[in-house]
């Protein structure tokens, strides 16, 4: 193929420029056509994970336990924070530039006249890369919804829906029932479907029934119990006792861990995992930006919470951390989010807001954001106990919070992947 990029940055720039011209046509026919030309097929079990929140954590736990058990694991996870390569992992390592360039070339070679969005093109390329890598198991994270997501051109052996909440209403609908139906689109006839949302939407349950999937619901087909020290999982035919809490912190992580263990129970004949491997995997799992507490003082927490459900979980986790004199929030969010719903659970916890725009045309306006937050000023707050300040970038907002916070204070970075990525990039450059 003449004049194709030879480096990953050049490929990504090309796809970005094309993406501007490709309108989103919400069907999967184009992706399916290119998948067939690629002869993309997995010769191993495929676990697919959808959900409003908790997808990334569930994928990371599955990967960690399976790696501990000695399997070769392919993982597609998104979005990335610093390097595009984070989206494709083979055996726990990020894919190399060369492997990604080869995969992009393979898609381009068969694409022909079919136009693909940036997301569709990169999804096909990464799934092709994983399918070619000779893995024992593939874990694929759904981007948006499920039914119309590019990942859904693959048939999953086990399909997990973690949580169903209101987000991306332009695409998915404005009720849990509509969104539940979209997410249930990854279920397949005769295959296992798992839902770890404690209140599964009726639309999801009905769709599983309509397509003939074998639905496992938390509280009915699998569950967990825990005390201060350890927890246990119970499924349809397997119990796992005396488990260490997952290294990912937060109250909701046992729901995610239970979904991961339910999937492993379903696949226990193909991919047996011993008790010790499960414990070690959960104890060692890492996922940046999900209630990630950085070492040192003041306490710093990075969390990609960008919808009300995730923000409420973040607030609950912060509430469990013990006393901090002041809490500084580095906060940037997209204008199409439920901004008031994201702020509401955090308003009692944050004393000083450092607001920032995000590097996206969808970024919320900082002046309007600051105005909303000023209205939350507690009555009778003493001078210096509450502030709202706008900055030009996540890096600037973060630098200001660091300069003001004392060692008994706390800094929380949240509101978007872009907010957390901006702070991660600033921290990385300050270390070099």
Image (cartoon, helix red, strand yellow):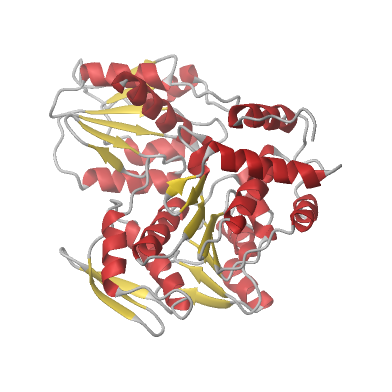
Q: Quadrant of residue 5?
A: top right
Give percent across and percent down for residue 227.
18, 67
Q: Residue at x 56, y 56 (%)?
A: 133
- Please state which of residues 231 and 331 is positioned toward the viewer in this rendering: 231
Can you say which quadrant of the picture contains the N terminus? top right
Does 232 sit left or right of 325 as displayed?
A: right
- Please state which of residues 92 and 79 is positioned toward the viewer in this rendering: 92
Q: Quadrant of residue 395?
A: top left
Can you say which quadrant of the picture contains the C terminus? top left
Q: Is residue 299 above or below residue 125?
A: above
Q: Residue at x 44, y 44 (%)?
A: 308
Q: Which residue ends up furthest to the right in the rendered image?
A: 113
Q: Which residue ends up furthest to the bottom in the rendered image?
A: 237
Q: Is residue 426 above or below residue 286?
A: above
Whether residue 374 is visible to the viewer of this picture, yes or no, is no
- Please state which of residues 175 and 204 is positioned toward the viewer in this rendering: 204
Give percent across and percent down for residue 67.
38, 61
Give percent across and percent down for residue 239.
31, 80
Q: How many marks?
A: 0
Q: Is residue 22 above or below residue 237?
A: above
- Please state which of residues 124 and 196 is positioned toward the viewer in this rendering: 124
Q: Residue at x 59, y 59 (%)?
A: 183
Q: Is residue 382 above or below residue 317?
A: above
Q: Residue at x 67, y 52 (%)?
A: 150
Whether residue 405 is visible to the viewer of this picture, yes or no, is yes
Give percent across and percent down for residue 290.
36, 44
Does 410 sit left or right of 355 as displayed?
A: left
């Amino acid at each position: 193929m003449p004049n194709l990029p030879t480096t990953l940055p050049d490929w990504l720039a090309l796809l970005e420029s094309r993406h501007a011209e490709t309108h989103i046509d919400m069907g999967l026919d184009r992706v399916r056509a290119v998948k067939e030309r690629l002869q993309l097929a997995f010769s191993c079990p495929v676990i697919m994970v959808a959900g409003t929140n908790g997808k990334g954590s569930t994928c990371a736990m599955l990967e960690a336990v399976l790696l501990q058990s000695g399997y070769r694991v392919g993982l597609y996870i998104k979005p990335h924070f610093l390097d595009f390569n984070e989206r494709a992992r083979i055996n726990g390592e990020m894919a190399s530039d060369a492997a990604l360039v080869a995969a992009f070339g393979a898609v381009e070679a068969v694409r022909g006249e079919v136009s693909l969005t940036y997301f569709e093109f990169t999804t096909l390329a990464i799934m092709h890369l994983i399918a070619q890598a000779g893995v024992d198991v593939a874990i694929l994270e759904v981007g948006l919804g499920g039914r119309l997501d590019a990942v859904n051109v693959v048939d999953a052996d086990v399909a997990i829906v973690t949580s169903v909440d209101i987000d991306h209403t332009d695409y998915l609908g404005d009720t849990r029932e509509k969104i539940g139906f979209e997410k249930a689109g990854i279920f397949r006839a005769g295959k296992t479907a798992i839902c770890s949302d404690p209140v599964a939407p009726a639309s999801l349950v009905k769709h599983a029934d309509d397509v003939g999937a074998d639905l496992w619901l938390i509280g009915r087909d699998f569950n967990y119990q825990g005390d201060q020290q350890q927890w246990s999982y119970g499924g349809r035919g397997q119990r796992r006792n005396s488990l260490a809490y997952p290294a990912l912190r937060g109250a909701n992580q046992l729901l995610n861990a239970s979904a991961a263990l339910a999937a492993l129970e379903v696949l226990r004949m193909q991919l047996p995992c011993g008790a010790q491997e499960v414990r070690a995997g959960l104890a060692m799992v890492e996922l940046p930006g999900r209630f990630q507490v950085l070492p040192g003082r003041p306490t710093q927490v990075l969390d990609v919470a960008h919808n009300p459900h995730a923000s409420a979980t973040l607030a609950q986790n912060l509430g469990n951390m013990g006393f901090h004199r002041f809490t500084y929030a580095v906060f940037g969010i997209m204008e199409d989010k439920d901004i008031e719903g994201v702020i509401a659970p955090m308003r009692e916890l944050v004393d000083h807001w450092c607001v920032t725009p995000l590097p996206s045309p969808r970024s919320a306006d900082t002046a309007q954001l600051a105005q909303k937050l000023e209205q939350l000023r507690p009555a009778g707050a003493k001078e210096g106990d509450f502030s709202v300040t706008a900055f030009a970038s996540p890096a600037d907002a973060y630098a200001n919070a660091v300069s003001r916070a004392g060692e008994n204070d706390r800094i929380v970075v949240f509101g978007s992947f872009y907010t957390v990525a901006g702070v991660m990039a600033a921290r990385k450059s300050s270390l070099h």
